Amino acid sequence: MPLDPKDEPFPYKQLLIVGICRFSEPLAFNSILAYSFAMVEDLGIPHKDAPFYSGLLLSAYAVAEAITALGWGAISDVYGRKPVALIGLAGVALSSLAFGFAQSYWVALLARFVGGALNGNVAIMQTMVQEMVKNPAHEPKAYATQPFVWTLGGIIGSAMGGFLARPAVYFPNTFSQDGLFGRYPYLLPNLVAAIGIVLAIIQGMLFLEETLPAQEEEPEQTTQAALINEPTINERAPLLTAAHSTLPRDASHPRNRSSISRASASRSRAFSGGSFRHRSLSIVEGLRQIRKKPSFLEDGMPSAIDQRFDIRRDSFGTMHSIKIAHHEVLPAPITRPSPSGPKKTFNSTVLMITLALTIIAFHQMAYITNLPVYLFDDPASTGIDFIGGLGLDLPDIGTFLAVNGLIALFTQGVIFPYFVEKVGVWNTFVSMIILYPTTYLIVPFISALPAKLISPGVYLSLFLQGLFGILVFPCALILLKNATPSPLVLGRVNGAAMSACCLARTVSSPLVGVVYSAGGSAAAWFFLAGCAVLGAVQLIWVPREHVDRVRVENVVREVVGELLPGEHGQHRAVHISDTDSVAVADYDD
C-alpha cells in the first residue's frame, strides 16, 4: 500500500542529484559572458561591430532553446524526464566543445544555436523536482534549492570564463602560444565546463530516478484519487468532474456532448451539496495538480541568478517561500458572481504589471551582457570617456562577474526578506523602479575616476543593479499573482509574463550592442537609463495593487538553523502587510 503523501520523506538524495545536474549547466552558460566580446574580435569581426555580434552570440542559445523547448517537453512526457535531461546535458557539453574549437564567428554561432536546440533542461529538471516531491509541505524547500544551485554554478562559471580564457596570454609560463590552448584560446573554459557536465551526466545515469508518473488505469474510488488521475487537469479544467460530484453518473453512458452538459450541471450542484470536507479535499488537490503541471518555457541567457519564475509556486523566483493570503485558500464566495460581472484574466492591472516586468527584464539583461563589453573595450580618451571602455583584462572581468553572483546571493538571501518587511511589497516595487535609472547613469562616469577607484565604481554599479533587480522582481510577481482574478488562470498569466520577459531578455543583448556600436559606450548606458526611466513613467498606469498579508519564510535562516545544534527547525517568518484586499474567484477571458 502506497504511503500517504503526508508521510513521504524529503527526497534529499534525488534533489542532490538533480542539483548537481542543474549546477553544471551555468558553468557553460555564464563562462561565455566574460570573453564573448574578446572572442568575437579574435574571430575577425571588426571592432565597431563586435558589440552587436557579441550580443547575437549570447542570444542564439536562448532563441534555439525557445524553439525546441516544447518539443523536448513533449518527448519527456512519452519517454521520461531522465533520458531527456541527460540528452540535454550532453548537448550542452558537445556545443561547448564545438564553441571552444571554433575558428570562425559563424561556426561559433552555429555551435551556440545547436547547443540551445539540444537542451530543454531548465523546465525538465524543474518538473522533475515537482514530481519527486510527494509531500506538499516539502514543496517550498525543494523549489528553493533550484535558484540557489543555479546561482552557485553561475558564480563559478563567470570566474572560469574570465580566468581560463586566453590562457597562453595571461599564463605564458604554463601555456604555450604554439600549444593547443594557444591555438584555441577559448577552449579551456569550455573544456572544463564540458568535463563538469560529463561528470553530472555520469552521476545522473547511475543515481537519478525517473519521475514521470506511470499512466495507469485505476478505478475512481475516491474524490481525491479520481482528481489525481484526471488526465486533462490544467489551468482551464474544472476542479470537480462528474465523478467527483455528489450525484451518481451512469458509467455505461459515453461522454458525448449531452453527457458533458449533464456532468456540468452535476458539478454545479456538487458545489452546493455534499460535505464541506469532500469539496475541500477536491479543490485543494486540484489546485496542487494544476500548480504541478510542467511549463516548458526556457530562458538560456547568462545571468547571476536563475531568471525563471512561476507564480503558481510560493518561491516567486527566490530562495524563499512567500505566502500570499489572496491565493492561500480558495475564496468562499466561489459560487456567487461579482455584481460588476466576471473579471477578465488579463485585466488592466495584470497587463500593466506584465509590461513593467518586461521593461525590467529588458534593461536588466542588457546591463549584464553589455558590462563585460564596456569593461574589456579599450579607452578612446583619457578622463571622461563616452566612446570607449575601461580596458580591463579578462581575469578582472571574471572577478567582477563572480562577485556579482555573490552580491545576488547575499541580496536575495539576506536583504530581501528584511527590506520588504520594513518597506512593504508595493512600496518596494515602486521605489526600486524609480531608483533603477541611477544604476546606468553612473557607469559612463566611472572612466573619470582615479585608477584606484575604478573597481569600487564598478562594484557600486553591480551592487545597485543587484539590489534594485532582486528586490523589485519578486515584488512585481507577488503583485501579479495578487492581481490575477482566480487561481485557475495563474498558469496562463504566468505563461504570458514569462514569454514576454524571455523575449525581452533575448533581444536586449544584440539591441544594446547595436546602440554601443553606433554611438559608443555612453550611448548604450544612456539608452538603458532611458528604458529604466520609461519603466518609471509607466508606473502612472499601474493600478495600486493592495497586498493583504505576505509571509516570507527565510530559507537561509532555516538552513542555518538545521545545521546548527540547538536551532534545529527554527526559522524566521517575515510578515509583510500593505492594506486589505478582497479575493476574487470568478474570471473571464
Image (tube, grey):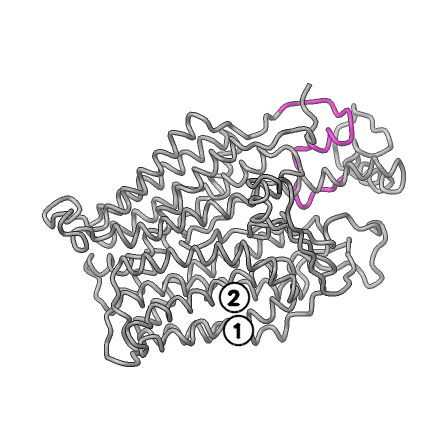
Image vertical order of residue 289 relative to residue 540, above or below: above
| Residue 251 or residue 82, whichever sits in front | 82
Main SS, magenta region, reads loop
Q: Disc 2 designates what residue? A: 468
Task: Check the picture and name the quadrant holding the N terminus.
Answer: top right
| Residue 328 or residue 541, whichever sits in front | 328
From this viewpoint, is residue 369 visible? yes
Looking at this view, name the residue that lies furthest to the right. Answer: 273
Residue type, mark 2 in image: Phe
Give the left or right position of residue 478, taking residue 281 as reference: left
Name which residue lies at 89% across and 42% down. 272
Q: Is disc 1 placed on a helix, strand or loop?
A: helix
Name the spot of residue 384 as percent of width and height, x first: 30, 81
From this viewpoint, is residue 490 visible? no
> CA gap, disc 2 to disc 1?
8 Å
Give the left or right position of residue 556, taking residue 426 as reference: left
Q: Are marks 2 and 1 in contact (CB under 8 Å)?
A: yes
Magenta stretch: give its range: 216-239
Name the spot of residue 6 as percent of width and height, x first: 70, 31
Q: Is disc 2 placed on a helix, strand or loop?
A: helix
Name the spot of residue 322 as percent of width and height, x first: 64, 52
Q: Disc 1 designates what residue? A: 435
Task: Check the picture and name the quadrant holding the C terminus.
Answer: bottom right
Name the spot of residue 25 as percent of width and height, x first: 40, 43
